[in-house]
Structure formats: C-alpha cells, structure tokens
Image: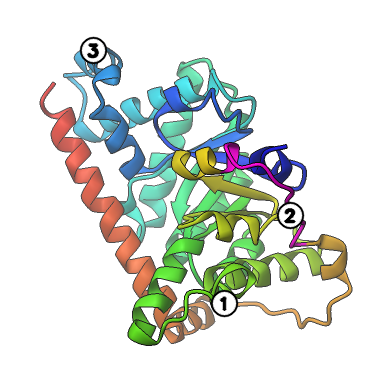
Amino acid sequence: MTQLDALKQYTTVVADTGDFHQLQAFQPQDATTNPSLILKAVQKPEYAPLVADVLGNTRALALDERMDRLIVRFGSEILRIIPGRVSTEVDARLSFDTNATLTRAERLIALYQAEGVDTRRVLIKVAATWEGIQAARELEQRGISTNLTLLFAFCQAVACAEAKVQLISPFVGRIYDWYKKQAGANWDEAARAGVNDPGVQSVAGIFEYFKHFGIRTEIMGASFRNVGQILALAGCDLLTISPDLLEQLARTEGAVTRQLDADAAKAARLDHVSYDEAQFRYALNADAMATEKLAEGIRAFAADAVKLEQIVNRF
C-alpha cells in the first residue's frame, strides 16, 4: 500500500492546486485554490482556451467580476473531477473589510449557482483576520460554508470556532519557515522534524482543543514543506497537499501511523478560552510569528491577485 492510500485511512486528502488536470491521478476528496494557484494555472498553455472562453465573453464587466468569473470557472471544472468540495478565495485585498468580504463571497456563490453547481460543495476562503472571521460568522448564518485561511495562531482558531465556521486551514509550512529562519545557524532539522516540527505542534494543539470541547469546525492542515510534516498529522480531519507532495506519497510504499486521536483529546485536561475583539487583537499581536506570517500572506496573495488582473486585462 502506498503512503497516500494509507494516509486516506485516517485523514481526508485534499489537493492544493488550481491545475485540475493534475487531479485525476491522486483521487482527492476535496480541492483548495487561492490566487497564487490560479495564477500558476492560467499561465499554462493547456488552459488558454478556457481562459479565452471566460474572458472573451466578459469584456463589458468590471475587472473584479471578470476575475471572479475566471476563478469560479476553475472551481467548477475542479468539481467535475472530485467528489467533494472546492475552496474558492475572496480577494485578499478585502481582508480587513467585513462588508466587502460578504458582498464578494455572495457574488462568488451566485456565480457558482449560475454554473449549475450545488453550492454546498463550495467553501468560501477568507483570511482569518478579525474582520474576516466576522464576515465568515455572517456567511455561515446565511448558509454559506467558509474556510478560514492564513491561520497561524491559537487565538485565530478559537475565534473561528466561536464564529462556527465550517473549516480552518492552519499553515504548517509557513510556521516552520518562521521558526527555522529565527533560529538561523542554530536550527536542528532532525530535532525539529515530525511531531517536533513547530507547525505540526500548532495544528496538533488546535486539534486537541477542538476535539476535547466537541467543536464541529473541521481542521485542515495546509502549506506543507515535506512529507514528514504530513505524516506527523495523520488523523487530522483533512490535509491539503500540493501535487508534488501527493506524488511523493503516491510512489512511496509503507504504512502510516495515526498521530492525532480525537478520543485521546477528549481525555486531556484543558481550559476553555474565549476572545472578544480586543483580546483577539492583543493575543495575535503577542504572537510575533502569527502577526508576521498573516501580514506576509495577505501581501503575497494580494500581489498575485494584481498579477492575475494584469492577465485578465489582456483579454
């Protein structure tokens, strides 16, 4: 049995890509996209006809709506291949505007409906800022499922749970990157691998808290740098994995051991915590890694959105 097949015994495997031609080989349940992944996909020659088809018929529309139509078309094509859900991201430049995020999310859902998609199969991705979490709270109340992304801190996870969001995506690899950079020459890769990886430890802590208190929000580890991080989170609700790492798992024979266990978490001794807005902002500010990585992630997604706009404007 391959490691990929073994992993699927414990965890729902999600493909982290906008390149839907890659999906068939790995048979993931769900798929996630973001502006960076869509940007990569639209620049591939095999997608030129699809891009031309979408954008050639939308020249009279505003740029942001043309962007959304292109993103939704990719999501719709992905849903023709996978059995589960696709995550589609709201423009990162709206990360600090609750009302604008709500408006954009509802338009994305309307565009999916126009494509004939059952919108129960769509998760709207929103950055886990305070404003984004409040937008997600409202969207969930309106029957629109959300995926809170760029999540690095425990306070973000708790605030998402309190907002009753459908799913959160803690970023394992980017947490690892920060601690490795901070340590510099003192970083010991072997000592900080597997269950000792700081990104893995962050997700494991969130998993234990959520399962202990019976929180229904799904946890999907994301942003992996190596297979070891993935295997150290076997048992997590979902893991979204890049095609390169999916390929490594698919061609490696071997057993996978469950690392995260909901029953064990129920037996842990944990205190319940809660955050209002001021407490959330202070807790996030107190976490240098999370503050820096959240800001960096929003900037990077925003920059790729601008690059995608430049491509759209050519049509």
Going from the N terminus, do you reach mark 3 or mark 1 first? 3
Q: Residue at x 68, y 42 (%)?
A: 12
Indicate the position of residue 47 as horizontal and vertical percent values: 29, 20
Q: Nearer the viewer, mark 1 or mark 2?
A: 2
The image position of residue 178, as x and y in percent, is 39, 74
Q: Secondary structure at mark 1?
A: loop
Q: Which mark is residue 57?
A: 3
Q: Residue at x 61, y 47 (%)?
A: 140
Q: Amino acid at mark 2?
A: Gly
For residue 95, what is the image quadrant?
bottom left
Question: For the stretch drawn in magenta, what is the main secondary structure?
Answer: loop
Q: Is residue 219 magenta?
A: no
Calculate the distance from the C-alpha at mark 1 to the C-alpha at mark 2.
31 Å
Amino acid type shown at disc 3: Asn
| Residue at image point 58% right, 25% down | 82
Give the residue at mark 2: 235
Region of the chain picked out in magenta, as a range: 249-260
Q: Is residue 257 above or below residue 201?
A: above
**Disc ID at residue 276:** 1
Q: The N terminus is located in which quarter? A: top right
- CA–CA distance between discs 2 and 3? 45 Å
Tell me if 19 is positioned left or right of 160 in this view. left
Q: Residue furthest left?
A: 314
Label 3 packing within 10 angstroms: few (<14), some (14-19), many (20+): few
Q: Earlier in the sequence, mark 2 or mark 3?
A: 3
Quadrant of the image containing the C terminus: top left
Q: Is residue 164 above or below residue 253?
A: below
Image disc number at residue 25: none
